Each structure stands twice: as structure tokens, then as C-alpha cells.
Amino acid sequence: MIVFPVMLITIASCSIVYFQMNSIQQSYDMETSTYQVLSNPIQILNRITRGVYNEIKLTTLKEPNLFENDNYIKALDEELKGKFSFVTVRKNKEFVYTGNAKELGLIRNSLPLFGVYNTDVDGGIYLGGKNPFLVKSQDFYFDDGGEGTIFVITNLNNLVPQIKTVAIQSLSVFVFTIILTAFVLMLWLYRGMLKPLNILRVATNQIKEGDLNHSVKAIANDEIGQLCEDFEEMRIRLKKLIDDRLQYEEDIKELVSNISHDLKTPLTAIKGYAEGLIDGVADTPEKQEKYLKTIFMKANDMSYLVDELSVFVRIDCETVPYSFKQISLKDYFDDCIEELEIELEVHNVEIHYKNETDKSIQIIADPEQLKRVINNIVSNSVKYMDKNKGIINIYISDLIDYVQIDIKDNGIGISKKDTPYIFDRFYRADASRSSKKGGSGLGLSIVKKIIEDHSGSMWVSSEEGEGTTISFTLKKK
Ligand code: ADP
């Protein structure tokens, strides 16, 4: 902002001065340096009459009477007019010719008397106050013996036009440069600051109105650009927060509707059987016992559902205090399978277990929650078993950083259309919904969340009528 205008003004001014000085030299046919012209313009005015003045001097010596010749003197005067000067001839104290009577009147009485002063080639007398004049005088005698003096008078109020042009053009360049600098500065300010600030202002207003869909793009790679990038990041996070919030509200609505539906079914049954007892519909002791057993079963279903729901809510809200421990994979699963074998005997289900991993492998897990996962998967295998001889295969393999556990059964399997959804909360395949077996549809969503909280993943592969394999991974220590 400083270097640019200073350079522009300097270059332009130097060019102007250079061209105008050339013009002075050509117009007045004189050799003069730029410095002289600028430092002492009076000297220039002095020099421009030099040629004519020399001629006058010669004439005073050779042919003084020519100064009484009107044609000669007028020609001289004409030549001097172009040089801001005029000529005046005095004979015996009388002015016999004057080129400019008005200007002469201003200095008439101050002009030197005959014999007092003769000017050198470059000399002159400076006369006048407000209206300064440079006077060159030469005394001589007319042929008739009369005392003559010729004056070449230059009006110093006139600057050489080229000097005027230098001044005007330099001033114009100065003003133009200031305007140009101001314009560039404003453009830079606008592009660099005002434009992005305006974009940010518009975006802020949109966000204020609740519209978070318009992205803000950084135009420059400076602080303002950084601000735009930060703003954009904030917008994206805010949008995600709001979307998550809306999704959460949607989920809660769905949850409440599912809970009320799932609780309503056993409640209606309980109400119906209780009414039957009160109204005396169950009139025999056998019937009464059957009614009471059904009420007890339905109450159990409700209690199971409420338990599952409370676990689900705690796990979903991440309020379950996991107690992660370093445990031996082999020891943990050996104990687990032993327990399961006893439990499954009652249901006529065989369990086969194969662990292909190294004995020394340690995993980081919460033993209690991991037990919940295995029990849930195994109890589903038992629940959805349609074969006379149920078989569950538990297979553990090594995946370098992880271990993979596959729990495979030969149960009813899951249809292709249901497989993608079985980990969704409250999702129950049609086949299991229509069966008499109880269930909440929450079990697999709970276990999947537990495995994810252990930094693992869970998936399913199933063949309808053949069986189901639920697989998950656990991170090694
Ligand atoms: P539920 O309480 O209904 O068992 P889950 O979340 O545990 O709920 O399971 C969701 C659905 O996945 C079940 O309703 C069932 O249809 C299906 N499913 C889960 N495990 C098996 C399995 N081993 N065999 C067949 N279907 C299964």
C-alpha cells in the first residue's frame, strides 16, 4: 500500500519531467538540465530571451537607428511575445516604443536611467512586488546623438507552459494514484474480508432460522478462510446433533409404541382370565387352576419383557458400568461351555465346542456382560429349534488382532427378508411372532450393543430350515 503508490508516482513524474524538459529544449532551443529548470524557473525565463537580447546588443553597436524603425521593432516585439516578454525603447527619457503599455506602467518609474546599468547576456534586474518583471537593458546612442535605452521586459508571472504542464500532470498522477490505491485497497478489503463476512452473516441467519443445509465455502487461505472452515465444521456438527436428536425422538416414540403393544397382549390375557375367575366362568377346580397358571405365565412374560427393557434402556443410554478385565479366552469359554452343557441337556440339545486359538490368548472383556451375550444367543438357538436332536456348534478362531466366535445351530433358520433386521430393537421374524414362544425382540439388539462396546462386531448368516450362525469378534489384549 505504500510501495506501490510511491513507485507509480515516481515513475510517472520522472517520465512527465523528462518529456517536458525535452519539449522545453526543443521549443526554446536551449540546453538546460532538468534540475536547473525545476530549481530556478526564473533562470529559464531569463535564458529564453537570450537570443533576441544578443541580437539587440549587436544592433545597438552596428545600426542603432533601427530602433526607430517601426517594422524592425515590431518584428522584435512579436518574437518576444512568444517568450512572455516585450520590448520598450526610450530616447532622451521619452518612451518612443512600448510593446505592452499596461505592464510598462507598473514599472516605468523603476527602470534604470541612461548610463546607470547595462545587462550581461544572462543578467537582468528584478523589478516589481506583486507583479514581478525581469528587465534587461542596453544603453546606446542614436545616430543623432540622442541617448537611447532598449529594455527587454519579461513578465515573471508567466511560468514556462511546460513547467505548468509538469505541475498539472504530476498533480493528476498523484490524485489518480491515490484513487487507484484506494480502489485496490477497497477491492482487496471487499474480496478478502467483506465478501466472506457477508457469506458468514447470511449463513448465520439461515442457521438462526433453523436451516442448516447451506454449506459455507472458504474462498481464501487466510484467517478469514480458516474462520469459514471452522464455521462449516460447526454447521455440520450442529446438523448432525439436530438430526441425531430428531432420530432419537423418533426412536423413543417407536419404543413407547412397541412397549405399550407388547405389554398390552399379556395384560389383556391376564384381565380376561381374571374376569373368568371373578365371573365364575372357571367353575371347576381344574379350570380355575388352568386360568391361574395362565395368569402366572403371562405375568412372567411381562416381567421378562420389563427386565429386558430395563437392560436395553441402560445399555442404550450407556449407563451400564462395564467392568472390563483381562481374561484368558480358553479358560473363560471352557467354563462357559461346561455350564451350558448341563443347562442344554434338559432341552435335548447337544453342544459341540472347538477352540482353534492359542491357549495363551487373553481378551479384554466384562465377563458378566459376555455371559449375557452367549446365553442370549444360545437361548435363541434353543427357542427357535425345530429338530428332534438340537445341535449347537461353538467354534473359536484366531483373526490376528481379534478372535472370532461362531455359534451355529440347526434350528428353524431365518428367512432372507428377515436377516438384515434381526439386530433391530423389537424386531421379531414373522415365524417367531406367530410361534407360542415368548420374546421381546430386544435380545439381539442388546447383545450387539454389548459386543460393539467391547470394540467388536456381530453378524448373522442363516439358511431357512437349516439353521442359524451368529458370529462376533472380540479384541485380543
Ligand atoms: P426375541 O426376544 O424375539 O428372541 P431377539 O432380538 O433375540 O428377540 O431375536 C430377534 C429375532 O431374530 C427373533 O424374533 C427371531 O425371529 C430371530 N432369531 C434370533 N435368533 C434365532 C435363531 N437362532 N434361529 C432362528 N431365528 C432366530
Image (tube, helix red, strand yellow):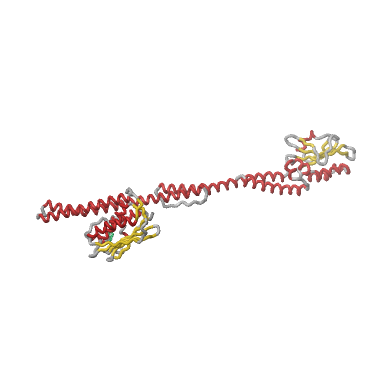
The front one of 179 and 371 is 371
Q: Quadrant of the C terminus?
A: bottom left
Q: From where the camera sits, is residue 259 visible?
A: yes
Residue most extreme to the right: 144
Q: Is residue 4 above or below residue 415?
A: above
The front one of 301 and 146 is 301
What is the x, y in percent for residue 476?
38, 55
Q: Is residue 296 above or below residue 467?
A: above
Q: Quadrant of the N terminus?
A: top right
Residue most extreme to the front: 359
Badge count: 0
The front one of 78 and 394 is 394
Ligand 1 positioned in quadrant: bottom left
What is the x, y in percent for residue 350?
26, 62
Please indicate whether residue 381 sits to the left or right of residue 457 in the image. left
Q: From where the camera sits, is residue 426 visible?
A: no
Residue most extreme to the top: 109
What is the x, y in percent for residue 308?
27, 52
The front one of 179 and 475 is 475
